[in-house]
Structures are given as C-alpha cells and as structure tokens.
Amino acid sequence: MAEKKAKKLLFTRQEMFELNKKVLLKRGVSIEAIAEISFQQQSKYTDNITRELCQESVEKILSLRDVFHHVQLAAEIDRLAEQRMFQGPIQDIILEDLGLFGIDETMGLDVAGLYGTIGQTNFGDIDVNKHGIVKRLNDAGKEDDICHTFLDDIVGAIAAAASTRVAQVTNEEIAHEDVGVKRFSIFDL
C-alpha cells in the first residue's frame, strides 16, 4: 500500500504571496491594479507617494496569513458559485451579488481591519465608490456565469489596507526625520 502524503497546511510568507498572486491573476487581478487604487486613494492626502511604495504595500499584505486565507476562500467561493456548486437560495444570492448580502463586505472589513479603523474607512470608500479593478470586477460580476461577489471586496480591502500602510510608512519616515534618524526598515510596519 502506498504511503499517504501529508497535506500541506502551513506556508511561508513567500509561498502565501505567490499563491495569492497566482489566484488573483487567474481571476484577472494584478498586483499593479490593486496598487493603483491605493495610490489614487493615498495621493489625495500625501504628497510624493510613489506607485512603488503602494505596490510594495500590496505585496506585503498579500503575504500575511489572515489575508492568504481570505483571498483563497473568496476566490474559491466565487468559483464555486460560477459552477453552481452551492445549493438552495445561497447559490443565487452569491451569484447575483444580492445587495442585502453582507458577508462579502464583512470579509473585506476583516482584511482592511488589519490596519485599524482607518483601513476600514478606506475600504468603505473603495467599496462605495468602486475604484479601478474593483469596479471592473463588480461590473463583470453582473454578467452571466461570472461571479466576483467576494473577490471585489477582498481586492478593495487589500487596496485599502495598502493605502493605510502607505500612510503609516510615510508618517514613520517623517517622525524619524524629526528625531534625526534617516533610516528605518519599512518592513517593520
């Protein structure tokens, strides 16, 4: 009898980042598209924000374990809804993205909440105003057999968290300059 291979349940941050990147790309979402939302949101409040810092922030967030679980689950729920794998009324509720169904927003708030109330406030802005890739996902989800009910909120939440992280990094840099310290690791945030 063949020996049963152990299931892999734990992943390194790099592995989680790569798996998240892969599932997002498969669903039509690039890191650059998420970073662009963060850039647009944060550049209203802070001068000299770079797209590179926004992209770095998205990448960092995509490597976090809680975010890994959210991204993987959101993409899988949407995929299963597209394949009509759910039973009962929940199938149509998810596939049609019923406005009164708030579980997808709850997951988004959870991800954005990793960066506190400001992260959640940023998510509210993105969720209501549907910026960039979030709008494209939301609009595509209105077509037959395409479901982005969960993914559009998770992507918006990642952008919101990244936007908040950018503000934190920028303010940390200013605080360090005020005390005469020029260098610190932005990976500490």
Image (cartoon, rainbow, N blue to C red):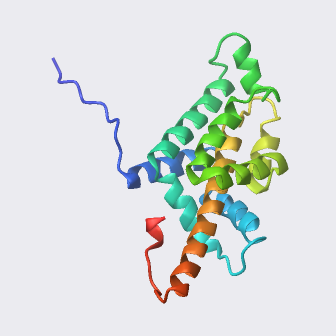
Is residue 99 in sight in this rendering? yes
Q: Residue at x 68, y 34 (%)?
A: 104
Q: Residue furthest top?
A: 88
Q: Count how many numbered circles sit on residues in the image.
A: 0
Residue 28 in view: no
Place residue 51 in its image quadrant: bottom right
Question: On the rendered structure, is 7 left or right of 71?
Answer: left
Question: Which residue lies at the image location 60% right of the left edge and 52% below the top edge?
Answer: 116
Residue at the spot 66% in from the left edge and 57% down from the top edge = 34
The answer to whether 43 is drawn above or below residue 121 in the figure is below
Q: Which picture quadrant has residue 96?
A: top right
What x and y, as percent, mark residue 109?
65, 42
Q: Position of residue 102 (x, y in %)?
A: 73, 30
Identify which residue is drawn at 57% across, 32% down.
76
Q: Out of 38 and 81, give the one closest to the viewer.
A: 38
> Percent x, y for residue 142?
82, 35
